[in-house]
Each structure stands twice: as structure tokens, then as C-alpha cells.
Amino acid sequence: MEMTGSRILIECLHREGVELLFGYPGGAILDIYDALSTAPFHNVLVRHEQAAVHAADGYARATGKVGVCLVTSGPGATNAVTGIATAYCDSIPLVVISGQVPTSLIGNDAFQEVDIVGITRPCTKHNYLVRDVNRLARTIREAFHLARSGRPGPVLIDLPKDVMNATTTFVWPEEVSIRSYNPSYRPNLNQLRKAATALTEARKPLLLVGGGVCLSGADEELAWLAHELDIPVIGTLMGLGGFPGDDPLWFGMVGMHGTYVANKAINSCDLLISVGARFDDRVTGRLSTFAPDAKIIHIDIDPTSIRKNVHVDIPVVADCRLALEGLREVLAPGLGETDWKSKHSQWLEQLGEWQNARPLCCRQEPDGPIKPQHVIRAIYEMTKGDAIISTEVGQNQMWAAQFYAYKKPRTLLTSGGLGTMGFGFPAAIGAQLAFPDKLVIDIAGDGSIQMNIQELATAVQEKLPVKIIILNNQYLGMVRQWQELFYKRNYSGTPMEIQPDFVALAKAYGAEGYRVTKLEELVPMLEKTFAHPGLVVLDIQVDREENVYPMVPAGAALDDMLLV
Amino acid sequence: MRHVLSVLVENEPGVLSRVAGLFSGRGFNIESLNVAPALEPGTSLMTITTSGDTQVIEQIVKQLRKLVTTVKVVDLSELRAVEREMMLIKVQADDPNRGEILRLADIFRCKVVDVSPNTLTLEATGDTEKLDAVQNLLQRFGLKEIARTGTVSLRRSM
């Protein structure tokens, strides 16, 4: 059938299973918007292109499906770059469609022209400029295939206006294969045997859960391994939810703001089994003193992650779930020969001692200012851990990571690698659209929330009951914390006393807003917030100079923590 | 240590900048880079000379393989390979020196490809060290211009 490029695009998106598209119109994509009005899927009008990408990202993180967004050429495309880089750092599958000036004008510095393929080359898994309408369907097919397979990531397709107007016979490519792209999903059996031997020999093994566990759905296999062999588990920020946060074998997050026990454990273990983590500097601290006594098994689908930062003894390049499944098969026959419980009991006892010696602390005085950690604990207790939590970036994010026990993958949506302020709220919008009946909460700071606060209009328009909890300390709290600790309390650029009345602002957008200033109001207001059928902004005035602890100073050894 | 990487890529717009961007973005070193269409239609062969320790070279090879447009990466330094580079060198050649320059050209099996009353342009082929030697020997006559292709290399058959 003869179709225009715009129609082919809509048809391909539909066939790829797209349910939702986040976008913002503009000159170069007028034809696409014209076709979108009769598309068989919903398109969400955001108020800023950055939020379109974060919302698609939040949708992808919460569902595991590919998030899709549509932006116009020039500033529309450049506004999307932060969102694309955010998704790239955390391996989130996205297809970003950008408009482009007509092919005849490309390179002429035309109005709203920018070389977005050039700009996004280092922050996409792959990108395309489609110059010929006959290449369109195949390109879209490839883009979805690349985004969701292997180590997932964002793929950008740049579509010139004339290509959208051109017509051709639509042919849906049933098969998609790219000869130079063959991710290895299946683990190498020899490597698994080596890993099994190492597990049998280890006296102090430790499982490290990374984001790959959540992305590949390896949580059940991981829980089997941990429980069957009685191995303690710690996680990276991206790994939270990959192992139940209320399990007795769980010892918390590792790294710069990790728990005392997790950081001590990593530097004392004799075998570290990393599953889908990439040893980011926020996780390892000083590399020369990282896990000094450990043999390292590194399971990762991306070969470049292996031996990039740390020395690896047994690399396993594979999908995390398939690798753990394979390991289970290798281990299963000899499993009964070892009494794992008594073999690891001393090690687990040691971890228990560390945990009790220095637990995560929240010193809430009954008549003192509200401690932000106390707020997160209260939210956890009220939701029983059964909510989707998104976070902004900074102290709010770290407290949300420390004081809420995530039980399942895809229940924490947070910008780990890039650390993008303004991520949480649009991500919550994406997640709420995917799960209309779930409680979706954005844990925010007063600084971060202002970075994409215009999305209140989007959420109200879509009638989304997202709950925004602002831990308001009138500071850019994490930066202020660093200034307090390492810059002689020179609070340069961090005070944020000038801020909108968030309650009035919420109401101005047609949402609801409440404020909490005293401790006794906290629980009733949280209850009121969660019971409200629509969007609520809850502005909680917290202790202004509370810090996130433990803290490993940048470049210090992991077990060299500030604990107060 | 110096490594010569042979990288077969899809011949598409932007492929060179993907590779170059990978090197610059990750702080890898490029000593020379040569690219031209390869035997199989639709592909190009890049020969990249780089340097680094084992871990860096391993990362470079893996990162190159990760690019969707890369078909094949071979580290020729680990194999037996032939290596050549070509150089065009324009040297000041006043009458008293012309004979000496031509003798040197002969010793190094260079070809004279352009002549003017006071310059000679020579074509030299060989491995990098040979070309460095030619360049050093001609230095004293006065070098006007120089153009080198960078290394190209193929694996030996036996």
C-alpha cells in the first residue's frame, strides 16, 4: 500500500507494540503530528522535551518495554539530549524520534537545524538519519531491535520533513538482523564451571546486585543462589529491588552512601560475584583498595564493562538471568555435598556484627525538626513497600535508596549514572501512565523539583494521581553537604530560600498541595496525600542541614567512611 | 605499546566520526588512521595505529566491536602481519645537493614523482621506521612539505 513517511512511522510504531508516545510538536514534525491524531495509541503532550524523554524512560524502567518519544528539530532535539544521556548511562531502552529540516536544507544552517545525529553519537546506543523513505520501515525496526536487545539503550532516529511527506509502498520487514550486532546472551559453560568452583572454595562470598539484574529479570535466579548457598547480598543503586530489601541476607547498598556493613563486606570478602554491575566510581571508591582480598566473578552482557575498572578473575559475558540459570544447572548436582549454612555462618555472623554496630541512623527527636530519613521510613511503612518510587537527584535520592526497602525490580526509578536532577517527576508520569492503579511517588528535593516542575500541567492534563513529596530544606542539599564537609562550610550557590509556594503552585496548575512543618502533621498529611485521588504536591519542611551518612569521600577507600 | 588494529566497518555516512569520536571521547590515542573501501562492496577497512597498556588496548578493541557499524576488529600486533606506509616528501634540491638527494632516493628505493628547478618530490614506501629514516636523512637539505598515509597492514597468509 502506498503511504507517506508519517503514516509509515505511525504504522511501524503500532506494530512494534507502542502504547504511549511522549512528545512536543514543532515545525519539522507537523506532518507526523497530523498523522498522530488518528494513531491507534495515545500521545502525551509534555511541556518540555527533556521531560518527554524522562517520561518515556520512566515508562520503560517501570514496564521493561521500549519508551518512545517524539521531538522537533533544532531546540526540540537538543532539549532531549539530557534525557537521552540519562537513559544511556542506565541502559534504558528508548526510541527517540526527532524531526529534521528537509534533506535539501541539511547542512545549510537552516531554521531550527541542528546535527542531532552528531550531537547524540556518544550518548546513544546507535542513531540514524533517514534520507530515503524506502529505508524508513527497516530503520524503525532496527532501532527497536537495538534498543531492547543486548545491553539496552536509547536509539535516535532523525527524520527530515521531506522524508515524512514522501510516499512509498509500505513493506513491514518481518525479520530484523544486523550482521555486525550479535549480543551474546548465553554464558560460556567453562566460565560457569570456574565460577561454580570458586563458589565452592569461597569462605566469604558476597553477591553484588547491579542494574542488569533488574533489566534482565534475574531476581528470582539471584534469590535462589543467595538462599541456596546462604550468600549475603548487597546492591548498587541501580540494583535496588533486584533482591528483596527486607530479606535477612540483604545488607544494603554499597558505595559512596552505602551501608557500613556493605562497604566493610566488600573489602573483606574473598569472592565477589557481581551480577549486572559495572563498577562505577561511586560504587568502588579508590580502585587500588577495592575488594583487595577478593577473587571477582563478573557477569555482564556488555564485554566492555569487564576489566574496564577492576581486575576480573572470572568474566562471564552473558545475560544475567541466563548466566544465573546456567550457574544453577552447574551447581545443582553437587549442591547437597556442602553444608553451605555452616560454611558461611561465621561470615554472616561477622556481617551481622557490622550491621548492628553501625546501622543506618535517623535521629528523629519528638520535638525537633523533621528528619528527611524519618519521612522516607514513614512512606515505606505506610506503603508497605508496595509503591513505585521515583527520585530526583541528590540527598533525596540517597535517602530514598537507604530508607525504603525495595522488594521487586522496577519499583525504584532513579537516574543512577548521569545523576540528572529533574528526572523523577517526569519519570513518575511515565510510570503512572503504565500503571494507572499503582501508587507512584516522586521523592524530590526543593531544588530538583524545580527543574521540571512545568510537567504539573502534563500530569494534570492526563489526570495522573502522582504524589510528589518534596523534602524541602531550602538548599541544594547534597552540594551543601560537600561544602560543609570539604569546603569549610562555604555555602556558595547552594541556599535556595527564594522558592515558590509549592502548595499554591500545585493549586495554580489545578492539582492539590499540602504542607507539613511539624512532626505530628507528617503521618496524617502523608495519609491524606496517598488517599487523594489526584496529583498532590506535599511540601515537607525538613531539617535544613541534615546530611547523608555514611559517606565515602570521593577517591577514598570504601571502608574509609564518614559515619556521623 | 604500539598496536595496529584492522577494523572492517560498514561504509555508511558518519562511520568515521563514530570511530574517531570513540577515541577522543574515551581518551584513547590515535597515532595514525587510514580508511578506504575494502574488498567486500559496502564496507571500508580502517587501519588504526594506537598505543596503550594491555587493559587499554583490550578496551579499545571491545569498544570498537561494540559500535553497531563495526563488522570485524583484528589486533594485527598479536599476529604475523605485513605493514606498509607511503610518504610523499618535497625536499629543497638546489644544484649542489640534487645528486646526493637522488642517491639517497635510490638507496631507499624512492621514486621521483615531481621535479622543479629547486625542489624534488619523492615517493617512499616502507614500514614506519624506514620512512622516519628517509625523513631524517633528507632533513638537512630542507623539507618543504610532507604527506604520509599512516600505516596499512594485512595479516600474513603463512
Image (cartoon, rainbow, N blue to C red):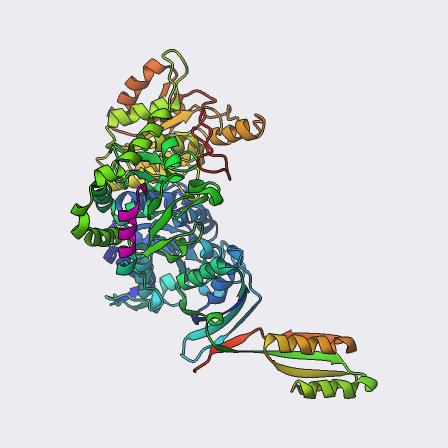
As drawn, is A447 to the left or to the right of A514? Answer: right
| Relative height, residue B148 to residue A552 (above, below) | below
Percent position of residue A396, x then y: 40, 30
Question: Which residue is pictured at 32% across the width and 36% down the height?
Answer: A459
Question: Which residue is pictured at 63% across the width and 78% down the height?
Answer: B130
| Relative height, residue B80 to residue A337 (above, below) | below
As drawn, is B10 to the left or to the right of A224? Answer: right
Residue A76 in sight here:
yes
| Relative height, residue A559 to residue B152 (above, below) | above
Q: Main secondary structure of the magenta part?
A: helix
| Relative height, residue B124 to residue A61 (above, below) | below
Query: What are the residue bounds of the magenta stretch?
Result: A193-206
Q: Nearer the viewer, residue A115 or A272?
A: A272
Residue A129 in sight here:
no
Outermost residue on the right side: it is B96
Percent position of residue A399, x then y: 38, 30
Magenta stretch holds residue A472: no
Image quarter of residue A254? top left
Percent position of residue A76, x then y: 44, 49
Percent position of residue B69, x then y: 41, 66
Question: Which residue is pictured at 25% across the width and 45% down the height?
Answer: A222
